[in-house]
Amino acid sequence: MQFNLASYIDHTALKQATSISDVDKLCLEASMESFAAVCIPPKYVSSARKLLDGSGVRVATVIGFPLGFIGIAAKVKEIQDALALGADELDMVIDLSALKSGDWQHLEEEIKECLKPVYDAGKVLKVIVESGMLTTNELLSCCALYGNYDIDYMKSSTGYADKGVTVDAVTLMRANLPRRIGIKASGGIRTYAFAKELIDAGATRLGCSASMQIMKESREADRK
């Protein structure tokens, strides 16, 4: 391994039944491995903030998750609440129903309103486009729209759609987004081999629930 794999990983627990003990374990593992962040439900942000104090691991949470079609005002309120609890990074699902209806004006208004509180707080916004549900032209249109704003990352997937991230989607995003915007690959990353493929294609973050297994496989690969 010729790169620091752990620094790419958002160690993730976003199942409906995620418990506080799951979050405690996630934070311990993230501290041990020095992952980039944990990504957890909003209700656990303050607990994770305390558990990770001084570790260097950031706290990420989700907004409008997983379907994305709540109203703009509700998303802004979720963002404000998450920031007040101590979130460093916000992973926000765009309004896919607006996209599929061709309502790009709504999507533009959404990103303007949702970016403002994050930007004002000096925190990180990742925009989830659910690439597995998009046509190539729709994904290109997302790159064109969000590339005009100071988002920090475009994120491929929630992990709740039938199709997660692909190397092709990451490659397309990297070729059509400004270099200042990172790419978070997520949804179905369960092996070190796939994680490395995604990084080679241009991913700068990986959202994984199988992070510990991926790290184990990476160490085994280093020993070969």
Image (spheres, rainbow, N blue to C red):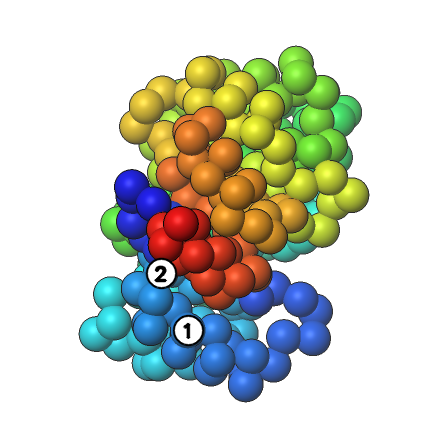
Is 19 above or below relative to 58? Answer: below
Question: Mark 2 and mark 1: span between their CA atoms?
Answer: 8 Å
Residue 157 is situated, as x and y percent measured from the top left of the image, at: 61, 42
Side (left or right) of 92 relative to 101: left
Residue 20, image x and y in percent? Answer: 54, 83
Using the image as rendered, state which of residue 189 and residue 27 is in the foreground.
189
For the N terminus, the image quarter is: top left
Tell me the residue that label 2 is attached to. 35
Q: Can residue 153 be seen in this view?
A: no
Question: Is 26 above or below relative to 143?
Answer: below
Q: Residue placed at 61% from the left, 81% from the top?
A: 19
Nearest the viewer among 219 and 74 is 219
Dots 2 and 1: beta carbons under 8 Å?
Answer: yes
Q: How crowded is mark 1: few (under 14 residues within 10 Å), some or many (20 or more)?
A: some
Q: Mark 1 points at which residue?
A: 29
Question: In the rendered view, would you say 18 is above or below 36?
Answer: below
Compared across the picture, whether 53 is left or right of 173 comes to left
Name the residue at 57% across, 29% down. 167
At x 35% / y 60%, what residue is drawn? Answer: 35
How packed mark 2 is, by other alpha carbons closer than 10 Å (few <14, some 14-19, many 20 or more), is many
Please, what secondary structure does the residue beneath circle 1 have?
Answer: helix
Determine the secondary structure under disc 2.
loop
Residue at 46% in and 16% down: 176
Q: Where is residue 208 in the image (x, y as percent from the top left)?
A: 53, 55
Question: From this viewpoint, which residue is outermost toward the left?
Answer: 54
Residue 210 visible to the viewer: yes
Residue type highlighted by circle 1: Glu
Horizontal side of 224 relative to 214 (left or right) equals left
Q: Residue furthest bottom?
A: 21
Question: Which numbered disc, 2 or 1, marks the residue that appears first in the sequence?
Answer: 1
